[in-house]
Every structure is written in C-alpha cells, then in structure tokens.
Image: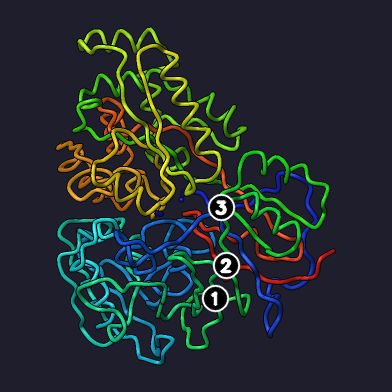
Amino acid sequence: MNRKTLVLPVVAGLITPVLAACGSSDGAGDGGAPIVVGVASQIEATKAAPAPLDPAQAYDVDAWNMLRGTLQTLMRLPRTGTAPVPEAAETCGFVDTQNEQYRCTLRKGLKFSNGHALTAQDVKFSIDRMLRINNTSGPVSLLDDIDKVETLSGTEVVFHLKKPDATFPQKLATPAAAIVDPEVYPKDHLYTGFDLMGSGPYTLKAEHSGGRITQAVFTKNPEYKGGITVRNDKVEMRFFDDSELMEKALRKGDIDVMNRGLSPDQIKGLQNARDKRLTLQEMPGQEIRYLAFNTKDPKVSNKAVRQAIAQIVDRSQLVRDVYSYTGDPLYSIVPTGLTGHTNSFFNKYGDPSVAAARKTLQQANITTPVKFTLAFTTNHYGSSTAKEIRTLQKQLNDSGLFDVAIKGVDSWQQYRADSRAGKFTAYGMGWFADIPDADNYIAPFIGKGNFLNTPYRNAKIESQLIPATRQETDRNAAAAGFKQAQDILAGDVPMLPLWQGKTYVAARDDVTGVEWALNSSSALQIWELGRGVAD
C-alpha cells in the first residue's frame, strides 16, 4: 500500500495564517451537500490484480482508505495516538503473559449493511479466508503469525498466535483484518470488481470506466454500530489523472478536500495563496521513499555495487531540488519519530562521496561503469516521481561509475506485478505504514513472502531480532533490536532509503474536521469531515 506513522499524536499545525471554518464540526449532516474528496491516483482492476477492493488483495493507501470507511475491523486507530481502540469489538486483550493468545468480545447487534448479522464466526471466516487465499500481493503477511482462530460463542473470538507478537492489536486495526460477509465473499478466491459489502460507517457505490474507479460515493450506513462518530451523511471521492487537475477542481469548488499527490510546487503555491477560501495544513508524516534491489540480478547481486550506490546518492539534493523541502533526508528504512530509529546509513557511509564509491567497487573487483535500468511508476506517488528518478540517474551517471537507464511504467498494478516477478534490477517504491511501529518498516520486507518478494534473506533479523522485539509490550524496550536490524540493512543494502515525507491537507474553508482528517498512520478518516459556515 498501501499501500503511509508517528508515535506522537497527530497535531495539525497551520503553516500559513488560515481562516478557520465557523459553525459546528457536525456539519454536512441532515441532507447537506456531500463532502467531496479529490484523489490524484487510480484504483484499477487488471488481469494480474482483478480485485482491488478485496481485503485479500488490496494493499495500497488509496484502496485501504476506501476499505476503512466501509469494512469494520475489531480494532481501529483513534483520532490521535498509536494505541488501538475497540471498533467492531467491545473489548480486546491478551489473555496470557506471552502475548500469544488474544481474545475479543464483539459489540451486540452488529450487522452488515445488507442486514445480515455479524458474529464471531464471520470474524473467523474473514481471517481464515485471508490466510487461505494467501494472495502474495496483498497484506496476508500481516496475519502470518496466526496459528488458528477459535470462536467461543457468537460474540467471542480468540486468536492463537504461533509466537508472541505485541504488535498484533495494531494489525487487527488494519484492513488486512477486515470483516466480510461469508454470504457475499467466496471463501477460497477473490471477490473481483469494485463492489464492497461491510458493516463500517458507510456503504459504497463505485462508478468505474475502463477498469478504473472514476468516483466513489460513501453514504452513511444506518446499520453501523461501532466506535466512530460520523460527522457527515455523504462523502464523494473523485479520482484525477494528476494533481494539477485536482488542484484546479479544489480552487473552483468542485472538490472540498485533497491530501495525496500534491507536488512541491503546488504546496508552495497553496502556502502562499491569497485565496482565503482555501486552507492548507501540514501534519507529521511517516511516508518514506526508497530504492529496492533485486539482489539476485547479476548487475547488483554483489553488495559492493549497492553500497557504492548508497555512497553516491545525495538525499539532500533530492529534498532540495525535487521536493522543495516538503520532505527530509532519510538515513534508515525506519523513519524519524518512531521508537528505535537510528541513522544507520549515514553512520556507515557519511556524506555522498564518489571517491569512496570508487574504492568500494575497486576492492570488490567490479568493472565500471556498472550498467542497469532503474524503474519507476509514473502516476502512483505523484508527478514529482519522474524528476526524482532522473535526478538519481544523473547523480549515479555523473560519477562515471554507473551507466543507468530509466524506465517508467504507467500502470501501478502492472508495476507491482513486474517488480514482484523480479523483472526490475532496481526500482523506486514508497511505503505508508500499516501500523505505527518500527516493526512495520522492517518485518514486511524481510523473509519468505515479503511485500517486495525480494530474494534477500538475513537469518539474524528473521529468526532473532524480529521475534525478540515482538515479545516486548513496552516498545521502548524493543528499540535495541530495531537498531541492530537497521545496521544490518545498511550494510547489505537490499533497500536504500531516500527521504521521508510530510503530510499536507488542502481544503475549502467551510470544511470542518480537517485537523482530524489523518490518523497516526496517515490514513484518511473521511468520517471526521463536516460542513460548516465559511467566514
């Protein structure tokens, strides 16, 4: 995905003087105008990935934002903070001292929006289904520590884990653990297309053309019983080919909110905007960008090649020239702000140095220039991605040590399929956290069935460090293990962290609840948005 996380509460800070919306934060209710949210990306169904809204396949931030509004999970992240709270559950907790048995009691009277009752047996079906389908492009790895799911009654369910996992409650708050109706979703294959049936705060009607969603309408679900207070009756989500078209729609008043895909120039323009009908808020963000390597590809299989790349890449130039300081250089796969972060790559390689890279390659008897192709997705991470990749290409080629070509892929689903199939030597990726924990920046990329399907393996991280950190309920006590893992990754360079993004939300001035629009995983909380009275 998802697939975009802080241990501190998300507190919105205005970065320019902004006129706040007046009126109640419960606006847009009682038949008021729907809140219209713009998204500068695409959700599509392809032959390789035919079920973009099935929890067993969906694993990107835009699809997850849609699932969070329509499918319930036992737990959810609160308005602020990182400790999950009950959602479809009334109570949840570990029932042993080893963090291996987790029991939840469901709220009474839960129903899917089609009127079917939701029971503990449906929870078991949903988790068993995820594990049975085992779609390797989906989020199944988040649940791979589950040994079995047991129902004690219609409202009680127990998860038996293969080994201790203190992060399990947070994983139950992700759409990977979404509860689906067994009478709608097949138990052993994907639910293809763009329909959703759940028990969340909204029902969904998705309009689509050419295999892509063009608009999604979220309508308040009268059957919903959970912990969320819904502050509007309807939200429309509109999808744009690029962020410039989305910004024009915001300025015209065709949409009310946008937060993903803004280019640095757009952010600067909105910061300096004289249009008092618009607000722009900057929030802490934990989105990261990185390069991934196919460590079996002969061009980069020798880690000296990857280390030399790490010694040449100038992150500060990327942040300055490409992203206009809307992000910060990142020297670890774990972003700053999370417990356990350490600047492992800077500690090992220091400032960019062509001389150091040349020495690394010479000592490994690598013939230069090293030729390879750097792939990227043209439309998934925003319009600045191509400029970022071209800048990296120039940095490497100007060293004289590399001869790098670049290749853009328009379809995100095709890009994911090709990268997982090992068709790229090196490729650009981003990561939005599934859960607000350093574990989620390390474990998903390590071991069999990892998110990238990378062939890289490290026994110490897999068999020692990750299991040890998951035994620590006090996440501060897990920091030492996380630091060791980051140091190992800096030495082997299966991935090269580049930068860490900030989060921005732009909105019309009559929209309320914008300060609560993103939670601590930078997930969009559309239920917080309301319609007030503009000043």
Specify the quadrant of the image occupied by residue 120: bottom left
Q: Specify which label sits upstream in the sequence, 1 or 2.
A: 1
- Mark 1–mark 2 contact, CB under 8 Å? yes
Q: Position of residue 171 (x, y in %)?
A: 33, 60
Residue that lies at the very extreme toward the front in this rendered image: 210
Q: Specify which label sits upstream in the sequence, 1 or 3.
A: 1
Q: Tell me if residue 528 comes above or below residue 457 in the rendering.
A: below
Q: CA distance from mark 3 to mark 2?
A: 12 Å
Element type at marker 1?
strand
Q: Position of residue 17 (x, y in %)?
A: 79, 47
- Give amino acid for label 2: Met
Report which residue position mark 1 lands on: 218
- Give amino acid for label 1: Phe
Viewport quadrant of the C terminus: bottom right
Q: Tell me if residue 337 comes above or below residue 166 in the rendering.
A: above
Report which residue position mark 3 lands on: 260
Q: Residues within 10 Å of mark 1 (few under 14, many from 20)?
A: many
